[in-house]
Image (spheres, rainbow, N blue to C red):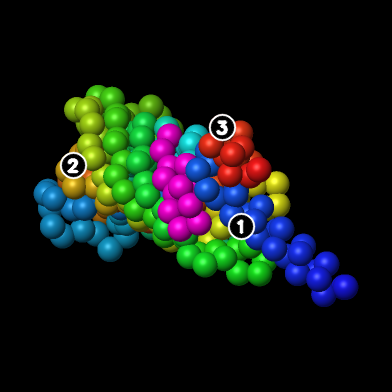
Amino acid sequence: MKKLIILSALALSSFVFKAQENNTWRWGAQIGMQGNQAKFVGGMSNANARFHQNPYGTGALNFNVRYDYNQRWAFTSGIGFSSIGYEFAIAENYSFYNLDKRYTTINSSVGLVEIPVLAIYKFKQNCNNWKWVASGGFVGILYGAQTSDKQFNPNNDGQTSQPYISSTTTTNGGGNLHARFLIGKEKLFKNGSIFNASLIWNAGFNNMATSTVNYTIDGQSYQHKFNNTGNFFGFRFAYYLKPIKTSTAKTIQK
């Protein structure tokens, strides 16, 4: 009798989870961090050993809608906000008691609006309701025209004719189409909500922003030029609410 009750409970639980993954819609939100990399395209090819062109770190926020077609396939879209940019630094002498002074850094950014359209493949779920998921698709990127000038001068006398390091970042604005791939794991809760944690790779194909950096070290002036297509690696965390009660979903759950 006990075994029958357990088997019945497992069968009922399996049916409920299947119903939550067939023809169901969910609203959700996604947050994350990413490192955006730029590419050298012009100016002086020789750089001072103290100069660094670092990946630009930024955050991302997306509001998504997700459609689970069945236990294997799902689709998601929505609107998101993020940025690309540049970070330039010069290494300095420093104290172990004040590591914040190790680099002189300037950075600039370009705000982005993104509209992803992704297909999701869901692998077999384990006994704890976790599963591997892989997704891929395309992202429409929109951004405005802007010019951003940044500089740092260690002098306090107001003289800025010869900045220690400066950059000018420009973009003409417009739209691009990017490719995006994610792989991660997600958990389906009993109430139908979903938590997802994924690594993300985004590939841009056309230049979106150009930055020219100038700096002077030991009396020698340098200039380098970099382009940014929006390529980045990062991670994302997403949470989807329990399924929206549609007529199709209600029919399946009955």
User: In this rendering, would 77 be left or right of 180?
Assistant: right
Q: Which mark is residue 173?
A: none
How many residues crowd mark 1 within 10 Å: few (<14), some (14–19), many (20+)?
A: some
Looking at the picture, tell me which residue is in the foreground, 61 or 103.
61
At 28% from the left edge and 63% from the top edge, which residue is drawn? 49
Against 194, residue 5 (above or below) is: below
Image quarter of residue 148: top left
Image quarter of residue 8: bottom right
Label 2 vs label 1, nearer the camera:
1
Residue type, numbered disc 1: Lys
At 29% from the left edge and 35% from the top edge, which residue is drawn? 141
Residue linked to disc 3: 247
Residue 144 belongs to magenta span: no
What is the distance, in whole Å, between disc 1 and disc 3 at their CAs? 25 Å
The quadrant the C terminus occupies is top right
Q: Reading the chain from its start, which is encountered first: label 1 or label 3?
A: 1
Residue 227 location in percent, x, y? 20, 45
Label 2 vs label 3, nearer the camera:
3
Residue 73 belongs to magenta span: yes
Q: Are marks 2 and 1 in contact (CB under 8 Å)?
A: no
At 24% from the left edge and 59% from the top edge, which residue is drawn? 48
